[in-house]
């Protein structure tokens, strides 16, 4: 089920009027924008710990998160992704209102695939999420996952009951060549070719411009909004109106407690995937931007 709640027509109009510039400048059809405004998508904040941590540092981080305020799970979904060897430790220490994800999984059934972790195993240890298609896995020369592999992994993981945090995004040279939209749509089209329409309810898209990841160079709010609106428009044209209005699209790339509020209040930004800043207790400040998002909608 999509986490969706209807808004009144007045709230829709006022929301559109509040964001005239990025919306009206965008090439996204106004119909798609209206449609995108008709639901409130539950805010989602993911923390990608990448290949960082020790038993001790993870224990300390989880304890710091546990000491934070209660999270209103009806307003925000929070999921952290530790390195696989620490997943069960994290799950056993971390507060239950935070989900736990792995950062990757194998493309098919368990078997003779040395070094891999199967989707079935992620479910078996009680986790419900996996990150797929992260730019480090797509672009590092030692890994080089292609669009179709990411798509096949996405389908398999969904079939095994996982929610997939699916990363897409362009390289710096692709942005400079004006190819952002084309790259995002190519990566999404590969996934569409493998999924059944209903599978999209188990996908959270993370738009992560590669030039912004781990660089301290965050996309402007207008750049993020433009890319998110284009992705939502693609979902509308290529999958369905329901999918477009209900799929969460997260922004990722050098998000910090200092820059997250302006990004969060963009109409098509439904949360964040956070790398470096998710390794600090102040990650909770990023989680709390769901409050600013709610205030911006009223
Ligand atoms: C990421 O790894 O998904 C990410 C967005 O990293 P950072 O926040 O460090 O840029």
Image: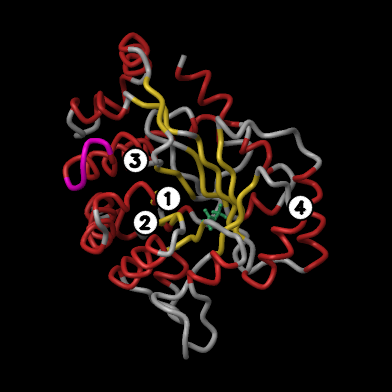
* Circle 2 residues within 10 Å: few <14, some 14–19, many ≥20: many
Q: Is the magenta stretch mostly helix, strand or loop?
A: helix
The reply to whether dot 1 and dot 2 touch (C-beta < 8 Å) is: yes
Segment colored magenta: 238-242
Element carrying mark 3 = helix
Determine whether the beta carbon of the residue marked 2 sits less than 8 angstroms from the nearest atom of ligand 1: no
Element carrying mark 2 = strand
**Left or right of 86 on screen, residue 153:** left
How far apart are the alpha carbons under marks 3 and 1? Answer: 9 Å
Q: Which of marks 2 and 3 is nearer the N terminus?
A: 2
Per the image, the residue denoted by label 2 is 168
Q: In this view, does 164 lie above or below 284?
A: below
How far apart are the alpha carbons under marks 1 and 4? Answer: 24 Å
Whether residue 231 is visible here, answered yes or no, is: yes
The reply to whether dot 2 and dot 3 touch (C-beta < 8 Å) is: no
The reply to whether dot 3 and dot 1 touch (C-beta < 8 Å) is: no
Residue 41's disc is none
Residue 62's disc is 4
Element carrying mark 4 = helix
Determine whether the beta carbon of the residue marked 1 sits less than 8 angstroms from the nearest atom of ligand 1: yes
Q: Residue at x 36, y 55 (%)?
A: 169
Is label 4 or label 2 in front?
4
**Left or right of 247 on screen, residue 87:** right
Residue 228's disc is 3
Q: Which residue is drawn at 36% across and 20% down?
A: 19
**Left or right of 271 on screen, residue 107:** left
How far apart are the alpha carbons under marks 1 and 2? Answer: 6 Å
């Amino acid at each position: 089920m999509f986490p969706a709640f209807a808004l009144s027509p007045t709230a829709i109009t006022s929301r559109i009027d509040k964001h005239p510039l990025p919306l009206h400048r965008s090439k996204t059809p106004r119909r798609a924008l209206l449609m995108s405004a008709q639901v409130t998508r539950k805010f989602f904040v993911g923390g990608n710990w990448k290949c960082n941590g020790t038993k001790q540092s993870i224990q300390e981080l989880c304890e710091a998160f546990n000491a934070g305020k209660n999270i209103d799970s009806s307003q925000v979904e929070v999921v952290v992704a530790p390195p696989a060897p620490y997943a069960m430790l994290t799950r056993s220490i971390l507060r239950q209102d935070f989900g736990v994800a792995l950062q990757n999984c194998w493309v098919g059934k368990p078997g003779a695939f040395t070094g891999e972790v199967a989707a079935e195993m992620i479910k078996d240890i009680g986790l419900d999420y996996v990150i797929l298609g992260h730019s480090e896995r797509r672009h590092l020369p030692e890994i080089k996952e292609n669009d179709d592999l990411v798509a096949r992994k996405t389908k398999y993981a969904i079939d095994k009951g996982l929610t997939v945090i699916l990363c897409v995004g362009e390289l710096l040279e692709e942005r400079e060549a004006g190819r952002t939209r084309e790259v995002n749509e190519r990566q999404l089209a590969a996934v569409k070719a493998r999924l059944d329409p209903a599978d999209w309810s188990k996908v959270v898209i993370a738009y992560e411009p590669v030039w912004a990841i781990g660089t301290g160079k965050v996309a402007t709010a207008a750049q993020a909004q433009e890319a998110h609106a284009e992705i939502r428009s693609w979902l509308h044209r290529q999958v369905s109106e329901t999918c477009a209005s209900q799929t969460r699209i997260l922004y990722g790339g050098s998000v910090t407690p200092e820059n997250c509020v302006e990004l969060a209040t963009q109409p098509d930004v439904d949360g964040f995937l956070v790398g470096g800043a998710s390794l600090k207790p102040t990650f909770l400040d990023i989680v709390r931007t769901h409050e600013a998002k709610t205030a911006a909608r009223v």
